Image (tube, grey):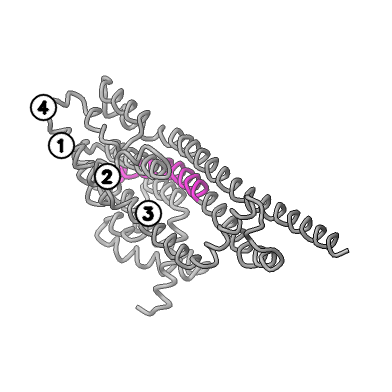
Amino acid sequence: MSFLTRIQLWQAARNLRAKRADFYYDLASALEDKVPLFTTLRKYEARARQRDPSAALLYQQMLRESMSGSLSQALDGIMPPSELIMIDAIQGSGDAMLSRGLYFMSETVEKIDKMILSVRKAVAYPVLLFVIFSALLTGFSFFAVPVLEGLLAPQKWPLLGRILYALSSTVRHYGLYILVGLVVTAVLFVRSLAHWHGPLRSRLDRWPPYSLYRDFSGAMLIVSLSSLMHTGVSLRSSLERASRFSTPWMRWHLRKILRGLASEHAAQFGQAFRTGVLNRAMEDRVQDASERRDPVAAFVKIGVGSIERIERDIAGSAATLNGVMMALAGVVLGIMMLGFFATAFEMQSAIQTSTGVAR
């Protein structure tokens, strides 16, 4: 396969993944009307040949992989693993069950995509704010402060001016090291989200920014489990399936949940979910569902209904984080502006004094 073909397939898969809610709905509609899966994919491939050659290549690949009748195999590498788990679980029950499952996934995916968009906005704003104020501080340090320093010795600057001078000197002399340190810290932080686990991490998950990742990942876990249980897969089997496609952080929690389910003291499965993978409100909902007359149906219900609530929780956590960032940015900007103007006024006063003495 040529490099260009790989690029085309990657772009086509990316586009299809972005529209997968509609894709699942259309497949479900066709299966509901007794149209075979292979026939539907063949129609999509023929249509794409006239409109989008890259999509046609992707559908050709899907047709080859679906020869065995496995939709999950045809979508392997294209759709998220959590969705492939559900498709694989339900496709053996016939086209009718697969159609209902795809309808359910289409509805769920739309809500998940909306939640992901909220998470991206929550992360993007603090990062953008940090970059802007870092650029302002760098500009002051390399252009504004040296001019003032050449006109008046820093020892004669007012207090705020000396603070500004100390900040600018640090940026000028150690800016590169600070930048490298920030990049390394950011990389380690991002990697720690999915890999770091343990009691200390569980405590940090209660506070931003780790709580944003905890809330999002916990919501995705509940949605994945409820989707599998919606198709008749048991809770234990759903957890074991989810574990195979999870991050080390999530697997650590899933192992604790499975041990909790095996404990003779776990009267309801809700107690087993109190590992820190969910926020307090979600833990209570799972506990309440485990005590209902039909726990499976109750669990499925909170899985779908929790997405909007988690989205609101993430928005609230993001607002708190943004508020802290705004306060810090305001303090830095205030120090820069007040320090600059205070030094300028002090300089003007010194110039007027020296001029009066000369006369």
**As drawn, which residue projects farthest toward the left?**
264
Q: Earlier in the sequence, mark 1 or mark 2?
A: 2
Instruction: Work out which quarter of the rendered image holds the C terminus and state it.
Output: bottom right
Q: Earlier in the sequence, mark 3 or mark 2?
A: 2
Give the residue pinned by disc 1: 259
Which mark is nearer the camera, 3 or 2?
Answer: 3
**Label 2: how many residues lie within 10 Å, few (<14), some (14-19) or many (20+)?**
many
| CA distance for labels 4 and 1 | 10 Å
Residue at screen point 46% across, 47% down: 116
- Identified by mark 1, the residue type is Arg
Query: What element does badge 3 sit on?
Result: helix
Which region of the structure is painted magenta?
A: 95-123
| CA distance for labels 3 and 1 | 29 Å
Residue 90 picture location, percent across and down: 27, 44
| CA distance for labels 3 and 4 | 38 Å
286 w.r.t. 2: above or below: above
Task: Tell me, yes or no, whether the two marked residues, 3 and 2, touch with CB atoms within 8 Å.
Answer: no
Which mark is nearer the camera, 1 or 2?
Answer: 1
Relative placement, left or right, of 175 versus 359 is: left
**As drawn, which residue projects farthest toward the right?**
359
Badge number at residue 19: none
Give the residue pinned by disc 4: 264
Give the residue pinned by disc 3: 189
Residue 239 picture location, percent across and down: 22, 41
Give the residue pinned by disc 2: 90
Magenta-span inclusion, residue 130 = no
Residue at screen point 38% across, 55% down: 190
- Identified by mark 3, the residue type is Phe
Which mark is nearer the camera, 3 or 1?
Answer: 3
| CA distance for labels 1 and 2 | 26 Å
